Amino acid sequence: MPQFDGMHRHEPIWNAQIQGDLCSRGRGQQSTGSEIYCSPRNDMQNVSRARNGFAVVQSRSVGTIARLRNEATSAGISWWFKVVPIEKCIFLRLRSLTWRLSTAKYLDLFLSRTLRRCSLFTINQNLKNIVTRCAALEDLSIKKLNFDASTADELFLLSDSVRLCKQLVTLSCPPLDWAAWEHLSNLPNLVRAGVRDVQICSAPAWSLERNVTNPTQFLNITALSLQVNNAGYIITVLQHSQFPSLRELKIETDLLSSEEAEQLFCALSNCKACQTLQQLEITVISGSRHQGSSLTAIPHLLCFAQLQTLRLVCCFSYIYLDNDLLLEAMSNWPHLRTLEIEGSCLHPSTVTFCGLFTALRLCPHLHTLRVLIDPVNIEIGPNKIQHTSLKTVDFDTLSPIVNTADVARIIFNVLPCVDQVNQFTMHTEGWDGVNRHLKSLKAAVLH
């Protein structure tokens, strides 16, 4: 390792933050630590002090100092790292490592056999070394922040490396190949898994190619996140997988056609999570050429009897919902607490206040509601029961609100815990009028 001679105050500075139980055993003995965070200085908010062009972070319990510097060479940028206590420092009991540096050089210095949590912001050949040396690794997070010509090779390397992990409890990383998914299905401790695309427009679409007849069972996964632009990838995972313990599912994708949308929701309803799924979030980012298309998503979701949270966002597509379908949905989701359905406002809503209030009686625990509603048909009929748990309401309309005072009075009488209506895209002036009348009604009760 090179000597640090010629320190310049204006060189870019990098920091290492050392936290946890650092134990110094005196001169000539090894130091151990439980958590290390390495990051560019401009990402760190709590830097102890700077000395001679270095950022220095020192443990309060002992005199262990970690220094990082950035030094230019003829071959480009080389990140030189040096740990300087009195003698050589090895973190034998290191349990958590966050490595935000763009290079893996000197990463080996931190690869303790006791490492349980590792967070990386790059993929390279050291990844296999990490998962091999740190056999006890339970939490692995990898965030690929940039895209270049080597990304595809790196993703294959990632899949190969994940297949070497035996003790994972939590995994978050870019998309994996199917061999890696099948390996994950055999890990008895894995309960949370998530894949996320490289968030760069030029990143290649990642797809799964597989020839397996029997579905793969993920018996212990309770939380799954699939944030992949290529809808085909997500559809393939869901079509050929079963998640009998799944409680939380988050999907984010770009649907290219109504056929793909149908495949996605159909696969979702058949992944064996109907009796366990409690939280479902689906965000569809469709292109403008699909704007105004209709999605019949909700019928596929009626099977999830334990659902407590449903967030369905398809900004460029109309999510079909009428009074009858809403009533059927509420009858199938008696435990529902949050319902947010946000689609294109290019189609008028067929959900009326009367239909909404009738359905609400079937969901006594609902506290958050977001739907498109018809503001013209405001007849609610007699003897509407108050819904006292609903507190947060977001309404939107395609048509303007004709009588804001009547709408406010309806909300005041049936939803006594709602202080105001939040609107999310259109006719804000109308809803502002509703809120003014609603505020006056509540103020009159207090006096």
Image (cartoon, grey):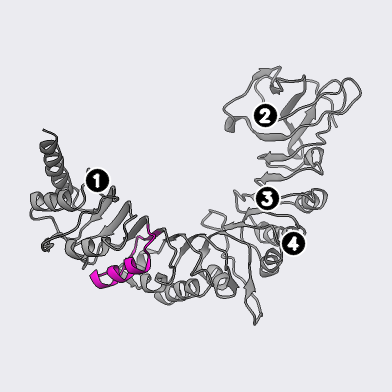
Q: What's the CA distance linking mark 3 and mark 4?
A: 12 Å
Tell me, yes or no, whether the two marked residues, 3 and 4, touch with CB atoms within 8 Å: no
Where is residue 231? Give x, y as percent. 50, 68
Determine whether the residue tagged by mark 1 lies in a helix, strand or loop: loop
Q: Amino acid at mark 3?
A: Leu
Where is residue 322? Give x, y as percent. 25, 70
Taking the image as shown, residue 163 lies to the left or right of residue 258, namely right
- Residue tagged by mark 3? 140
Mark found first going from the N terminus, 1 or 3: 3
Taking the image as shown, residue 324 lies to the left or right of residue 83, namely left
Q: Nearer the viewer, residue 427 or 222?
A: 222
Tell me, yes or no, whether the two marked residues, 1 and 3, touch with CB atoms within 8 Å: no
- Residue tagged by mark 4? 163
Residue drawn at the location 58% of the way across and 63% of the way down:
204
Residue drawn at the location 23% of the way across and 69% of the way down:
323
Classed neighbour count for the residue bearing mark 4: other residues with Cα under 10 Å, few (<14), some (14–19), many (≥20): some
Tell me, yes or no, whether the two marked residues, 1 and 4, touch with CB atoms within 8 Å: no
- Residue tagged by mark 1? 417
- Of discs 2 and 1, which sits in the foreground? 1
Taking the image as shown, residue 311 lies to the left or right of residue 267, namely left
Q: Nearer the viewer, residue 169 or 210?
A: 169
Q: What's the CA distance linking mark 3 and mark 2?
A: 22 Å
Tell me, yes or no, whether the two marked residues, 2 and 1, touch with CB atoms within 8 Å: no
Classed neighbour count for the residue bearing mark 2: other residues with Cα under 10 Å, few (<14), some (14–19), many (≥20): many
Mark found first going from the N terminus, 2 or 1: 2
Q: Amino acid at mark 4?
A: Arg
- Residue tagged by mark 2? 15
Determine whether the residue tagged by mark 3 lies in a helix, strand or loop: strand
Q: What's the CA distance linking mark 4 and mark 2?
A: 32 Å
